Image: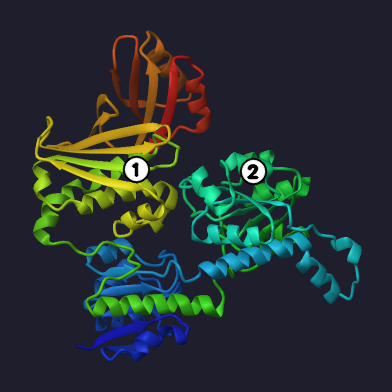
């Protein structure tokens, strides 16, 4: 059988040689089609390969009656409606590793150019100005590089910085002191990195937690004269706050490859002589473009030849009978993982998933993947999905255990998830209640009954008169309306838990006020 593949964006020719050499595929390059032409012709193809130009919308996917697989020759899949593809049973693959070296090298190049003021000196010389004394830089040897985000690219940057005899301190939600020691770097919190680093480079996904991670508050904590590098994602650095910090003299300079809005041209940052910038060139090397094309080409061939794809973004279709039995638990499973991970800030060492009741006669790995996805996406964002969740957990050094028992434990089916960190074990359990949907029924050893949705406040407090009243008055002062409240205690006057659902998100300032009320010793807000 011959499979027809459409390549709708420019790709490196060497990168598609695996497809050229295959006897069972026919390739069509069509990078000039309009949206209307693409919609008209997409039904002819078994596979579609894109970069970032083609918008693979739900409308396009619905017209792609033969399409079996979509390949994105790059890391992100922002231009692909993955949910629509999943609904149609279309596998989406990408190339998350192909540009690692390119992005790391670009980061180091920006670091060196920033430290020695190379672009500024070059521009002056082009203007026939010989001004050596204006461009005195600093050496990297002996300086502290702070790395926030130690994934594939951050790790490579750290290794290269060590080669420049820099001292490296890094933060990553999955980094431990033991792992840092093995790498020859120092482990630290985000605040530790901010306080001691001479240069700070960020390598995190853009998530709710990392949006404007380097903001005005962060710049108040940094050493005077620190220099900032962002070759990761626009939006991690608050550009207005960075501008103010440079103008004030707190930050000595910045090297930026990515921006909150691209194309980027109007922000006053570009008017500052202390700022050097490139137009999102992190993956713009011949080798990187070839590598991502090779990775996608090989994955598509594996798929058509009956093999296992290496970089899937979504979950392949399940047997319809199994899907019918376990799909109602999908939302519960993911929300349990998402809820639980917010109860700790420590590095997760082990995850134990226990199933009890009638479900245990089924294949439950799809539910486990949902749980792990829910946990990991707090730190990894859209990079984690049902297919790669277990792989990513293993890469982070997390041990996963799965247990089953047909004992009902008070419910027809019960899913219990525990995570172990250096500070202890946290547990959450949930079930489906007929007519009510997903419910959280236990947090640690406390009994509760709460829907895992909306804005939830979890508080641990001492069982004393007046605690609930003071809490309610404080939230009322901030016009936070309480929708539901659950309270349980270990024993009279002992430890207790309070869980509230409220009408809107509460910020760190309100959580700090709650902790200052007395008898409340843990507060966490969880948005599901």
In this view, the residue in front, 432 or 493, is 493
Q: Is residue 156 visible?
A: yes
In this view, the residue in front, 224 or 421, is 421
Mark 2 = which residue? 194
Badge 2 or badge 1: first in the primary sequence: 2
The image quadrant that residue 66 belongs to is: bottom left
Q: Is residue 524 left or right of residue 47?
A: right
Q: Position of residue 115 (x, y in %)?
A: 75, 60
Helix, strand or loop at mark 1: strand
Question: What is the distance, in whole Å, between disc 2 and disc 1 at their CAs?
Answer: 29 Å
Q: Residue at x 28, y 34 (%)?
A: 428
Q: Is residue 211 visible?
A: no
| Label 1 crowd (10 A; few <14 / some 14-19 / many >=20) | some
The image quadrant that residue 292 belongs to is: bottom left
In this view, the residue in front, 437 or 463, is 463
Location of residue 176 with respect to 98 vertically, above or below: above
Label drawn at residue 51: none
Q: Residue at x 67, y 39 (%)?
A: 221
| Label 2 crowd (10 A; few <14 / some 14-19 / many >=20) | many
Mark 1 = which residue? 350
């Amino acid at each position: 059988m011959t499979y027809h593949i459409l390549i709708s964006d420019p790709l490196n020719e060497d990168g598609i040689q695996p497809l050229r050499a295959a006897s069972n595929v026919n390739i069509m390059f069509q990078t000039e089609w309009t949206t209307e032409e693409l919609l008209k012709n997409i039904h002819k193809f078994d596979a579609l390969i894109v970069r970032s130009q083609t918008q693979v919308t739900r409308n396009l996917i619905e017209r792609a009656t033969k399409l079996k697989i979509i390949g994105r020759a790059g890391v992100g899949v922002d231009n692909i409606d993955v949910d629509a593809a999943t609904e149609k049973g279309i596998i989406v693959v990408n190339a998350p590793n192909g540009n690692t070296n390119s992005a790391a090298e670009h980061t180091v190049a920006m670091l060196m150019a920033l430290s020695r003021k190379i672009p500024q000196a070059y521009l002056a010389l082009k203007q026939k100005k010989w001004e050596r004394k204006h461009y005195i830089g600093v050496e990297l040897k002996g300086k502290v590089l702070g790395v926030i985000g130690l994934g594939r690219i951050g790790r490579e940057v750290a290794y290269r910085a060590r080669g420049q005899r820099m001292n490296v301190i890094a933060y990553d939600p999955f980094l431990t002191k033991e792992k840092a020691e093995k790498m020859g770097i120092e482990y630290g919190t985000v605040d530790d990195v901010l306080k001691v680093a001479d240069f700070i480079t960020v390598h995190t996904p853009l998530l709710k937690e990392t949006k404007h991670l380097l903001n005005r508050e962060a710049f108040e904590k940094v050493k005077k004269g620190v220099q900032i590098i962002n070759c990761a994602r626009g939006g991690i650095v608050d550009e207005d706050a960075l501008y103010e910090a440079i103008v004030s003299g707190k930050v000595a300079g910045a090297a930026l490859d990515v921006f909150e809005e691209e194309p980027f041209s109007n922000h006053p940052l570009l008017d500052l002589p202390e700022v050097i910038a490139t137009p999102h060139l992190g993956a713009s090397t011949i080798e990187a473009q070839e590598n991502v094309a090779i990775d996608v080409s090989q994955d598509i061939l594996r798929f058509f030849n009956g093999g296992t794809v290496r970089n899937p973004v979504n979950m392949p279709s399940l047997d319809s009978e199994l899907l019918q039995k376990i799909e109602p638990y999908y939302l519960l499973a993911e929300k349990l993982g998402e809820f639980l991970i917010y109860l700790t800030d420590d590095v997760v060492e082990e995850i134990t998933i226990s199933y009890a009741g009638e479900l245990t006669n089924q294949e439950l790995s799809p539910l486990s993947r949902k749980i792990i996805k829910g946990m990991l996406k707090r730190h990894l964002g859209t990079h984690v999905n049902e297919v790669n969740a277990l792989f990513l957990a293993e890469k982070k050094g997390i041990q996963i255990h799965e247990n089953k028992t047909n004992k009902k434990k008070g419910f027809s089916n019960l899913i219990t998830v525990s995570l172990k960190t250096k500070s202890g074990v946290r547990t959450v359990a949930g079930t489906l209640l007929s007519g009510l949907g997903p419910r959280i029924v236990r947090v640690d050893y406390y009994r509760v009954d709460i829907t895992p949705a909306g804005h939830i406040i979890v508080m641990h407090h001492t069982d004393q008169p007046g605690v609930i009243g003071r809490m309610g008055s404080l939230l009322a002062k901030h016009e936070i309306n309480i929708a539901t409240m659950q309270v349980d205690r270990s024993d009279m006057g002992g430890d207790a838990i309070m869980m509230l659902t409220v009408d809107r998100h509460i910020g760190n300032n309100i959580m700090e006020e709650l902790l200052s009320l007395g008898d409340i010793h843990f507060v966490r807000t969880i948005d599901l």
